[in-house]
Image (cartoon, rainbow, N blue to C red):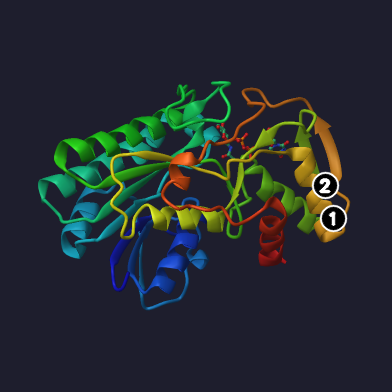
């Protein structure tokens, strides 16, 4: 585990910066590349182990030189246009960031024969789209419906099959509904738990789309970090995709009830019609990850408690 050189693209974002915190604790040397379009510099720990470049991953010259100079052991590809709505508004730019830039990184690794130990790409449960099959297995039918989901799926296949073809140790993960500290609630398309948390913090109203009976696989950020480390450090698994969730589904109504008890507060709820394109239920089959020793440790209660304490 000691003194690995690690690249985290999107390292100033929600998931990336939590990963960086963990890698610092692991004793790694970390390089973060983030254009701060969504991420925040303050998310990064002030540590001599972390080097930060405010830069877009779409800059080929920069990325190429960085990869050649640094010779990373581990590469986490987390930089992305993370908002689905944003991808619908800017499909071509999204494609350049979410797909093209990542393929270019693989291409540099291949061409320069750089000795990387593992490349991990972050994909999304969005690839399953409206496929009603539950729980979602990695081999369930996919149905990517937005530029975001299309690019995530295509890049995931690229990362895995490129790995197979050119002997690069790659894996991909499909995140379900991740929540926790440092999640950016700024956009109205932020994850629902960050929006609820904002509402509680500012005593503002919270809008429920639909009747609140929709369910999601809400996974606390530290369980996600556990999964990311499991799939990279000292793990021989390659060329596979893994769902990252808890394997459980919880309704929005239940979340609200739990949160109200936890913080002794009553939400000001507004009811609006179901959001177009929303799916009713979603949760992961996580047996693939479980077989590697993954164990989700946080319940919605313990996760929300930590999240709430982090923002107070
Ligand atoms: C996530 C994506 C979404 C994408 C979908 C594809 C995020 C933030 N959203 O949606 O863009 O299309 O995966 O799998 O990554 N809700 C409310 N009030 C709010 C916000 C949300 O009631 O203010 C509801 C939504 O209507 C939804 C549920 O909460 O039913 C969860 O919403 P969200 O956090 O956006 O996640 P997904 O629906 O899974």
Q: Which mark is residue 170?
A: none
Q: Are marks 1 and 2 in contact (CB under 8 Å)?
A: yes
Q: Position of residue 232 (x, y in %)?
A: 34, 55
- Callout 2: SS: helix
Name the side, left or right, on which 24 lies relative to 273.
left
Disc 1 packing (10 Å; few <14; some 14–19; many ≥20)? few
Nearest the viewer among 64 and 114 is 114
Q: CA distance from mark 1 to mark 2?
A: 6 Å
Nearest the viewer among 310 and 172 is 172
**Residue occupying the far left of the picture:** 112
Compared with 245, 26 (above or below) is below
**Residue occupying the far bottom of the picture:** 48
Q: Position of residue 135 (x, y in %)?
A: 57, 30
Residue at 32%, 55% (x, y): give it. Answer: 235
Q: Position of residue 123 (x, y in %)?
A: 42, 39
Residue at 45%, 45% (x, y): give it. Answer: 289
- Callout 1: SS: helix
Q: Position of residue 34 (x, y in %)?
A: 39, 56
Residue 31 visible at all? yes
Compared with 61, 243 (above or below) is above
Residue at 28%, 34% (x, y): give it. Answer: 158
Disc 2 designates what residue?
257
Considering the image in quadrants, where does the C terminus appear?
A: bottom right
Considering the image in quadrants, where does the N terminus appear?
A: bottom left
Nearest the viewer among 215 and 205 is 215
Disc 1 designates what residue?
261
Compared with 61, 239 (above or below) is above
Compared with 153, 182 (above or below) is below
Total numbered labels placed on residues in the image: 2
């Amino acid at each position: 585990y000691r003194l690995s050189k690690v690249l985290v693209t999107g390292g100033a974002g929600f998931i990336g910066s939590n990963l960086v915190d963990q890698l610092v604790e692991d004793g790694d040397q970390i390089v973060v590349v983030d254009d701060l379009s969504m991420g925040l510099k303050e998310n990064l720990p002030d540590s001599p182990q972390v080097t930060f470049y405010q830069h877009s991953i779409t800059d080929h010259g920069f990325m190429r030189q960085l990869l050649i100079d640094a010779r990373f052991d581990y590469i986490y590809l987390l930089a992305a246009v993370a908002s689905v709505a944003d991808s619908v508004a800017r499909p071509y730019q999204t494609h350049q960031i979410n797909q093209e830039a990542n393929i270019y990184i693989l291409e540099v690794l291949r061409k320069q024969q750089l000795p990387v130990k593992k490349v991990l790409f972050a994909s999304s449960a969005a690839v399953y789209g409206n496929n009603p099959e539950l729980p979602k297995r990695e081999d369930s039918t996919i149905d990517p419906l937005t530029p975001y989901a299309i690019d995530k799926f295509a890049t995931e296949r690229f990362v895995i099959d490129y790995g197979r073809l050119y002997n690069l140790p790659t894996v991909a993960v499909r995140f379900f509904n991740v929540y926790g500290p440092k999640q950016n609630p700024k956009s109205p398309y932020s994850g629902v738990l960050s929006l609820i948390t904002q509402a509680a913090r500012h005593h503002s109203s919270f809008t429920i789309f639909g009747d609140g009976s929709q369910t999601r696989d809400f996974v606390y950020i530290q369980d996600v970090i556990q999964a990311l480390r499991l799939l990279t450090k000292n793990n021989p698994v390659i060329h596979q995709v893994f769902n990252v969730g808890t394997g459980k589904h919880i309704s929005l109504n239940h979340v609200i009830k739990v949160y109200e008890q936890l913080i002794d507060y009553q939400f000001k709820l507004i009811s609006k019609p179901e959001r177009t394109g929303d799916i009713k239920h979603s949760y992961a089959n996580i047996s693939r990850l479980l077989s590697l020793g993954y164990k989700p440790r946080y319940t919605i209660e313990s996760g929300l408690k930590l999240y709430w304490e982090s923002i107070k």
